[in-house]
Amino acid sequence: MIEIPEPPLSRADCTKLAAEIVRSPPRDWTRLRLAVIGSSTTEFLNSFLIVEAARFEILLDIWNGPYGQIEQQCVDPGSELYRNRRDVVLILPELEELSPDLAWRYLALSSDELERQVRDTAERLRSVVEAVRLQGNPKILIGNLPAPPWKAAGLADAMVENSLEVILRSVNDRIAQFCRIVSGAAIFDVHGLGCETGWKNWRDSRMAALARAPYSSEAMSAIARLAARHFRSWSGVPKKCLVLDMDDTLWGGVLGELGRDGIHLGPDYPGNVFVDFQRRLLALSDRGVLLAAASKNNAANVEVVLSTHPACLLKREHFSAFEVHWEDKATSLRRIADALNIGLDSIVFFDDNPVEREWVKAQLPAVTVIEVPKSPLLYGETLEQSLVFDHFTLTDEDKIRVNFYQQEEARSLVRAGATSLESFIRSLEMVVTLGNFEEAQLPRIVQLLAKTNQFNLTTRRHDEAQLARMLQEGALGMLARVSDRFGDSGLVGLAIAVPDTVDDWVVDTFLMSCRVIGRGVETALLAGLERQVRQCGGRTLHGVFHPTAKNQPAADFYPRHGYQGSSDPGRWYLSLDERRPMPETFAVAGLNFEP
Amino acid sequence: MTRSERSEKLMETVSTILGMPVFEITDDTSPDNVGSWNSVAHLNLVVALEESFGIAFSPDETMELTSIRLIELMLDEKLGAS
């Protein structure tokens, strides 16, 4: 076991650790082939990168591009960059190299010329990113521009119309704009890091002069930490739900003793500390993280605080699940996982009481338990630094996921009132829309592949490059969206069929989001897939089930749909001569399945 | 810090940064006879020396520290010869 001390690390320690890691890496670490190419020399970053990635059990194999050759290396398909497979390409451009006039002479440029150069600079970086994407489709981290070491306008810089800051912001905004469109590319926020670190601490002018390596040790350490955070966000189970205690977590003091008007929550200390923490929690909710409550309290008292306390920002509707009673918290967490249809391993638990934390750790080792500091002032920072809710990109569906669950609560109420499952489904007035994979949806498809565990027949985690290749080689990708009278659930199901021979097709992937299981959507998706395979000339469709620790609910999917067993117990097949009818409890739209 | 302590620390730092065993390091060890002592390792070594001895080298000094003997002379100059 390699132990890595907290930063800052001395250069000697960092070099030593990196050498140790590379010499005898643990076998179970994730291997990542990283290319780093920048306007400056990037070799000095390597030991920092190796050490920071090691914190997350990631082993880097790094190739450094020659300095100042971002465009040559990335745009030329014959360059050294492309001689080997790269999983990640980290690009670190600087304004000084890309457009010296913008960096040093912006005062001498006309507005038109300045605008043209800003546009050109961003366009050149866009070509770089698009070119990299075409070569094996690695993940791309494109740095935005750090500030040059001095400002041509001096004291007046913040006053002039085209200040250095304005130029940087314009180029950086454009980089972000194309990153949102090019799939697999993400901004690497060098500018943000520099602001946090302070530009004065960012540069090492001696190293800049001697070796074209302008970064200070502090800067390199920050860059490496951020890169590692990105690497980490691509692996592991994404956390979906934050379960919160209430007393001394959402407000100061014990509600049962102090009453609504006695708890610490308000504009002055110590109440303002808790208001700040609630603000952060609301932001997490906006980001798509589900909030849930697990508190030992009288539910009625808590409801009063949530609905009438003037300083309480969190309301009842922000909690997707609400376990407020005197039962133990492991039970509460299990119920929350059930109610939200998520695994315990996607739950994060935040409770100021160490006894509760230990209990949950012992009872439910899959749950991530945050080590909450004694001082409430540090709650927000601690949660942020735990990195549990780091996601590579925020899709629109993440942002509205919270609504899905609120709709689900309403659906549950309807379910309670409906007499049979069928009439319940009819009462939902569902519309299932089937469609084929489109390029713009690939990020969301990859996300669904990565995080669906329960109703997932093969649990194959394809990435975008693999998907693109499969589709190119003739695979059929079909997706299902569902809406009902409570709202749009978005993309909820995926199926991929690949031709084995002209006649025989195999279902490579079939998965459904748990939100809609039990409504027959899976049958509609299967029917759609079968029909389209038939249209492509397939005569027999083979289905495979790979059991995992979680996908038992999907085990009988093929036999339930009339597939014949084979000598292999995990494999079924169906002759496609007969057309499977679509379920009649809802409307199916999208693809045209005329014979 | 005595001279021998200083020398020990120097050997340790050089050994770490250049990835070579202490017993192979001599006064004449230099970029000319150690393959791993390239330009990147050189600057890493300079930064590591600055950090372990709490001193700073100018750019020109940085370029002059091209053998163990020269580094020791420079340390004498910065830290006193005693």
Image (cartoon, rainbow, N blue to C red):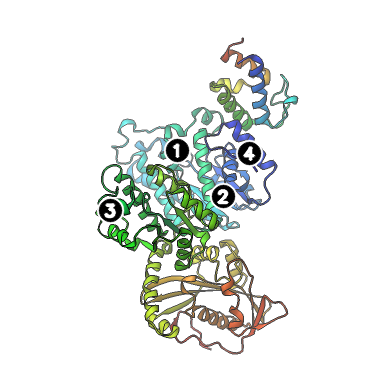
Amino acid found under the numbered disc labelled 2: Val
Residue with the mark numbered 4: A18
Residue with the mark numbered 1: A100
Question: Which residue corresponds to the image point at 42% horizontal and 64% vertical from the top-left?
Answer: A397
**Residue B6, image x, y percentages:** 63, 18
Query: Mark 1 or mark 3: which is in front?
Result: 3
Q: Are marks 2 and 1 in contact (CB under 8 Å)?
A: no
**Residue B77, image x, y percentages:** 58, 13
User: Tag 4 or tag 3, which sits nearer the N-term?
Assistant: 4
Local packing at callout 4 (Cα closer than 10 Å; few below 14, some 14-19, many 20+) is many
User: Tag 1 or tag 2, which sits nearer the N-term?
Assistant: 2
Query: Mark 1 or mark 4: which is in front?
Result: 4
- Name the side, left or right, on which A504 lies relative to A407: right
Depth check: give the residue in front, A128 or A553: A553
Residue with the mark numbered 3: A259
Query: Mark 4 or mark 2: which is in front?
Result: 4
User: Tag 3 or tag 2, which sits nearer the N-term?
Assistant: 2
Residue with the mark numbered 2: A89
* Chain of residue at mark 2: A
Amino acid found under the numbered disc labelled 4: Ala
Secondary structure under badge 1?
helix
Secondary structure under badge 4?
helix
User: Tag 2 or tag 4, which sits nearer the N-term?
Assistant: 4
Residue A131 visible in image: no
Q: CA distance from mark 1 to mark 4?
A: 35 Å
**Residue A143, image x, y percentages:** 48, 46
Depth check: give the residue in front, A355 or A10: A355
- Name the side, left or right, on which A529 lies relative to A500: left
- Name the side, left or right, on which A184 lies relative to A191: right
Above-or-below relation of A358 to A511: above
Amino acid found under the numbered disc labelled 3: Gly
